[in-house]
Image (cartoon, helix red, strand yellow):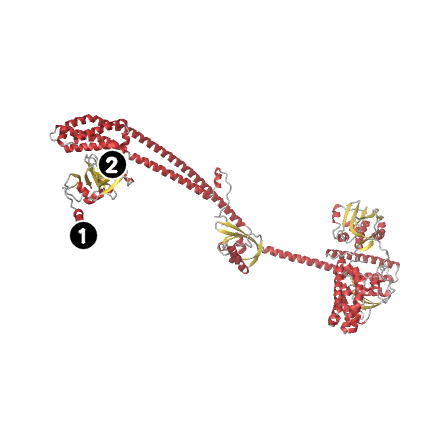
Amino acid sequence: MLRALRYALALIACLGGPALAQDHTRDLPLPKGDVILTVSGAIGITNVGNTAQFDLAMLEALKSETFETTTIWTEGTERFKGVPLNVLAKRLGFTGQTLRATAINDYAIEIPMSDAVEGGPILAYLMNGEVMSVRDNGPLWVVYPFDRNPDYRSEVIYSRSIWQLDRIEVLN
Amino acid sequence: MLGGDRHVTFLPERSAMQFLHLFTFRHRVLFATLLGSIGVAVVIVMSIDVARDMRLLDSASSDNVQYALSQTEVEYLEYELLLARAVHETAPDLKRLRQRFDIFYSRANTLQDAPTYARVRELPYFSAILPNIRSFLESQAQIIDSPDPVLQAAIPKLAETAAEFRSSIRLLSNSGLQYFAQDSDQHRLNVAITLTRMAAVVTFLVAALLVLVFYLVYLNAQNIRRRREVDQTSNRMKIVTGTALDAVVVCDLNGRILDFNAAAEQIFGHSAKTAIGADLGELIVPDKYRAAHDAGMARMRAHGEKHVTGKGRVKLEAKRATGELFPVEFAIQAAQTDEGEIFIAFLRDISHRVQAEQDLVAARDRALSGEKAKTDFLATMSHEIRTPLNGLLGNLALLRDTRLSAKQTRYIDNMDTSGKLLMSHISDVLDITKYDAGKLRLRPVAMNISALLQDIVDNQSGAASANNTVLEWGWRGEPADWIRADQDRIQHVLMNIIGNAVKFTHDGRVSLEIEMHSDQQSTAVMQITVRDTGIGMDAELQAQIFDDFMTGDSSYIRTVGGTGLGLGIAKRFVTALGGTIEVQSEKGTGSQFRIRLPVELIAAPESVVKERKQPTDAAPCHILLVEDNEINRFVAREMLTAAGHKVSEAHNGQIAVDMAQTQHFDLILMDISMPVKDGRKATREIRAGHGASARTPIVALTANAMAEEQEAFLLDGMNDILTKPLTREGLNEAIVNHVAARPDTPDTPMPATEPETKSHIATRYLDDLRETLGVEALDGLLARFMREVDETIGYLDDYTDQPLAEIAKKTHQIAGSAASLGAVELRGKLLAIETAAKAADMARLALEIDALPAIWTRTRETMQAERRAAPRD
């Protein structure tokens, strides 16, 4: 029994310890795998030059949120899991008012920081529990909880729902 | 204040919107609110509609589709370009190539699956191309997903295929155009519909607003007009109350004054400013009524009880500002207003009216007392005139007995005629006085009307022949001689009418016609018509002849003279007798008077001999003459001594009482008006005393013939009345009637109609009473008397138990009544009882009381018979 408890504590220390340390030290590790997101601009935390670069594991390490919703681009209800935008903003210490989100094909859109709220959009990396390939609009897709909040069922929000996202620039 | 803020009834509307008056104000508010709500709802619904349309317009997915289609082509071209470049490179960027393909793949995939492109997919050639793209993607993906060397080797092949496929992609991109066109059309249509709908709603709303505006304008106009009407009504009310002569005071349930008009200010002396708001009770209710007023107001507040309100006019007192109380007449009405129940009092100061009424009553009283004074004056004057006239005529009578020359006799005759005429005038005046005072009493007697007419005709025939006029009379129809009626009055009337006819007819004819209209056995209407061929009268005169002091043309006065009272008296007498008198006349032709009188037909009496009218001379007796007037005394004494009587004289009542105490007289002749002690008082004293002449018959001598006085004389104890001037005949008759009835002079003739058995009652007394009181009154009197005597006899049955003093007192009282009613025997016995009781002579008392019932039985029978008997003549 005691051994089991000690094992659990150790596991917490291994898994939660670095996260807690990161929160407090605000250090961002270097990406080990393919970089799928590069955040630049007015941010407080960086790891590569003036940017904060993330591989999938780093994103998965951040606090995530999962919700189900329909979209106008997919058929039926999908379950998305990802990093909420406000979590990322807090993690990286965004100081700007607007985000310029750019896709792999250089499609760019501006997202006001006011969208980065609790219950707001997430940077989805899992759809229906699977990693999204580029063919499936992956690897990152900004998804708003369309079904949960009718305000998000607007053309503006649709335009902000950028898929194949790979860069975010925080503008002042 | 009045009507100002309160509901008033509006004048009827003539406008087309009259129906609106069917609604109350509340209904109208409801209606307007409903209309407004509907309008707002429509606007909201339309706004939502428009907003939705606008949002749809705003967020048209076409942009997205357009972008998606062109972007698909762009992504394809990027991929194709990369392929084309890679063909010539030895080490192409395969990762980038794969990424480009993946991007295009995702794009195409989205076009195929996304619901947002469902409508695009419905386009026929678009849907035709999609399977080609699918197969293209799958064939390419197979190569792209291959290991790098395989991919690198397949690049030329890939590039070639991609170039070939470019046209299909191009077609796909272009296919969007048709969609755009359709979509635009659809949107334009939608916008147009929305705008049209919007325009319709706006038009409707504007129209509704206009209607509403017109309605509000109408309502406003109506309100202004009503306001004006209310103001006018209010002003009118103000003017009405302001100019009203009556005070108008309005107060609420608490008695607080709400309105006080100008008349109220004037009447009460309070200004409206101070009165309004003040307490009604405090201001105008007199202090003595305050408690009652407050209680009444409290009662009304508590239970709604109204004692005065709405009950019409009430008279009370009110209080002025000076504290002066004055009579008011007022009426209070209640009214319901928005401010609760109010009371409107209309008050009138009736102090002037009350004063006027009092003045009027005083004036009437003065007039009545004046009238009485006049009557009294006339009565007194007739007395004062008669007394010296009596002396004059008496002396003339005496003078006639002396030795006279023929000339002197003629002078005396003239004087006698003048004197008697003067006496008759005075009698006329007295008759009128009596009639007007309601004191004329009828004395119906059995009479022969034929004899009366004959007498009158005989009487007037001398005057008629002097005028060379024929005077005649006759029956029309069946003659009926005997009637019961007031002979004196009928004679007076006929004498007057016939006398006039004779006076005013020269060389003509005066005819009397009498007729009896009888429909029953005993009663009849006697009609006497007097026609003459005299000078006649015009209509104006005819209308006046029955008025007092009417003497016609002045020439008549010169020719015939007269007081002018004759026909006035005749008219009064006829009316008193229940009949009518009327006249028809034509000036220059003659006159006709017609008299109708109700009479009672009776059978002719068996003996028509009137013993009393022609009495034998009375036996000589001793008479006490009480008279203060020396001449009258002289005349009476001369007449009496000439008839052989012994006469003692007394100058006033006191002397008479004294003489009657000591001497016995057979008869006392008592004047009424005398100094020291008048005749009535003297009589009462003589009767009350036990003197020698206490039971001697007393006959009043009076010039004053008022009936009620005659009654009083009899009640005083007098036995008869002789009216001055005295005549030998009158004196003789009185002596015969009263002295001759004594038992010690049995040879004295008694009237044939009075049987001997009635000697216990001097029926003459009853006749007198009947004449003076009337049958009814006498009947009542006798009934009462009989009851009293019955009681007294019952009382005397056990006399031994009663105190003697009370027996004496009771018998004395009854004896007095018996005397008045002529029950002489009864009276004597009662007086004997009284005397015995006073003397405490028990043996005698027993004897007298034992004798009483027998006497009473006799007396009672006679009295019973007399009760309803008709008067004797």
Crowdedness of circle 1 by 10 Å Cα count: few (<14), some, many (20+)? Answer: few
Residue A2 - label: 1
Task: Identify residue for label 2.
Answer: A159
Q: Taking B572 as reference, is A120 left or right? A: left
Q: Amino acid at mark 2?
A: Ser
Q: Nearer the viewer, residue B281 or B778?
A: B778
Q: Can you give x and y, in whole percent of width and height, for residue B21 in the image?
A: 48, 41
Tag 2 and tag 1 share a subunit: yes
Residue A17 - label: none
Secondary structure of the residue carrying numbered label 1: helix
Secondary structure of the residue carrying numbered label 2: helix
Is residue A75 among the parts visible in the rendering?
A: yes
Residue A172: image quadrant is top left
Select label 2 or label 1 by which is in front: 1
- Is residue B330 depicted above or below B107 in this figure? below
Q: Nearer the viewer, residue B19 or B372?
A: B19
Q: Can you give x and y, in whole percent of width and height, for residue B155 in the image?
A: 15, 28
Q: Taking B260 as reference, is B674 left or right? A: right
- Is residue B306 depicted above or below B179 in this figure? below
Chain letter for mark 2:
A
Q: Can you give x and y, in whole percent of width and height, for residue A75 in the image?
A: 26, 35
Q: Nearer the viewer, residue B62 or B512?
A: B62
